[in-house]
Amino acid sequence: MNVVVIGSGYVGLVTGCCLAEAGNNVVCVDHDVKKVNALTGGTLPFYEPELEAILDEQIQGGRLTFTTSIRHAMGKANVVFLAVGTPPNSDGSANLHNLLDCAKTLGQAIPDDCVVVVKSTVPVGTCERIRRILNNATEIGRHTQRISIASNPEFLAEGRAVQDFRDPDRIVIGADDPHAFSVLSDLYAPFNLDGNRLILMDIRSAEFAKYACNSMLAARISMINELSGLAGALSADINAICRVLKGDARIGGSYLHPGVGYGGSCLPKDLSALIDLAQTVDEPADMLRSIQKVNLDQRERLFHAIRTHFNDKLRGKTIGVWGLSFKPGTDDVRAAPSLSLISSLVQAGAIVRAYDPVAEHAAQKALGDMQVHYSPCAMDVCANADALAVMTEWEEFGHPDFKEVAHQMRGNMIFDARGLYQSETLQRYGLEHYVLGQNK
Ligand code: UGA
């Protein structure tokens, strides 16, 4: 099929590359000329395992091209994906400005029978708004035609996006006409591996499904973090408790890892957008608000523990930070707990030394002119550090040379925000271990 993907961000690029890999002719569109030029030359604007190799291969094979022009891209497209970002407004609602702008341009360039697919995460009712925009634009620009529109939310997670796209748990298609269902079912056939991954529904339900999933994931994380804090206060072991929880098939095993709370661009943003959406229909959304509060409190808890350890005297103390990205496998630092910790530490007068295997550049950009010393390797962070905070569970932080860590550090406290280490192991090297949620 001829496929156009508008928006070459995270979701758009993974979609474009993987659909090209499946044999489609794909044109990706982005308004950022620099990005389009870099992509044409085979360079990704972010770090994502496996993706650059597919990008390169598909460009070489002639199945994947990039342009800044929606009109130029459309040609004889059978399917066009809208995958532009919907960042949060200051009130938490989703900003649809770019998406609706793209729809206006698209309306004047859309060929007959092309299915418009909204992949961006959007509030319920957005596809209807887009349909109205497209209808208006096509009536002005050309002959009236029926617009076929579908909602096809994306569930891939950063760091394993290619794997998630190639082997999805489920593929959600929300539409209200047979043409859209049929074209999208065909397009996704290579990914519908055992024939039962497609879930078909109406458009509004598909739009909502994405928010429902991210809210449920966030709920599990906040719940396990709250239980972990309680367990710590009651001198119970959350790791043992987790084994019991995971042993219950009704509860399931994933998203039960206690830590410093969820970050990233998706869970925090989608929760805020859903709370905003709830307000528009006079629903209280008490649970959603609590999930959000517990998550913010969890970050505060870590900073509070560090401050307390130093008797409120952080000025001049050197704190090492291992890990800047919001999770391993990505250089994404959006809403990363490490960045809020670093801001609080710097504000309190501490000297921060930080290291991340891939996210240093993104962190530098996000933190602007904030004084942070970036280290070339994990061990360099430890030099004369009064304490070390381990913020991201990158593999290389899993089994460090503790003897060398202890030797390099001036202090001996490890703040383990992800529950990576055993206290007994650290004790052997004279290191103290604070596990978030486990210690008061
Ligand atoms: C999330 C969802 O997992 C995807 O399904 C969804 O498609 C995506 O958002 C999106 O909306 O685009 P992602 O933001 O990449 O994906 O990150 P996750 O792997 O879900 O992790 C989110 C956060 O939760 C991270 O900060 C992670 O450290 C934290 N987390 C996760 C925990 O603290 N504990 C856990 O047990 C699991």
Image: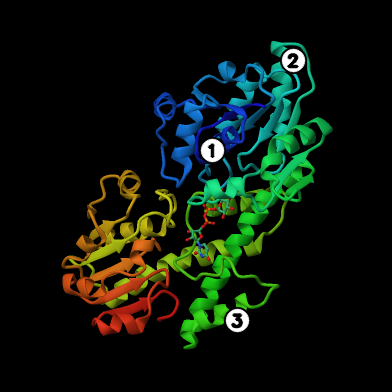
Q: Dot 3, how many residues are within 10 Å of its Cα: few (below 14), some (14-19), or many (20+)?
A: few
- Per the model, the C-alpha gap separating discs 2 and 1 is 27 Å
- The secondary structure type at the circle numbered 3 is helix
Is label 1 within 8 A of ligand 1 (CB to nearest ligand atom)?
A: no
The numbered mark, 2 or 1, whose residue comes first in the sequence reads: 1
Q: Dot 2, how many residues are within 10 Å of its Cα: few (below 14), some (14-19), or many (20+)?
A: few
The one nearer the camera, 139 or 407, is 407
Q: Is residue 429 above or below residue 53?
A: below
Q: Residue at x 76, y 25 (%)?
A: 147
The one nearer the camera, 262 or 275, is 262
Callout in the foreground (1, 3): 3
CB of mark 1 within 8 Å of CB of mark 3? no
Q: Which residue is drawn at 59% across and 54% down?
A: 271
Q: Position of residue 214 (x, y in %)?
A: 61, 55
Residue 352, quarter of picture? bottom left
What is the quadrant of the N terminus in the image? top right
Residue bearing mark 3: 244
Q: Where is residue 15 in the image (x, y as percent from the top left)?
A: 58, 38
Residue bearing mark 2: 139
Q: Residue at x 47, y 88 (%)?
A: 235
Q: Position of residue 285 (x, y in %)?
A: 66, 59
Q: Residue 85 carries which label?
A: 1
Asked if residue 410 lies left or right of residue 186, the reply is: left
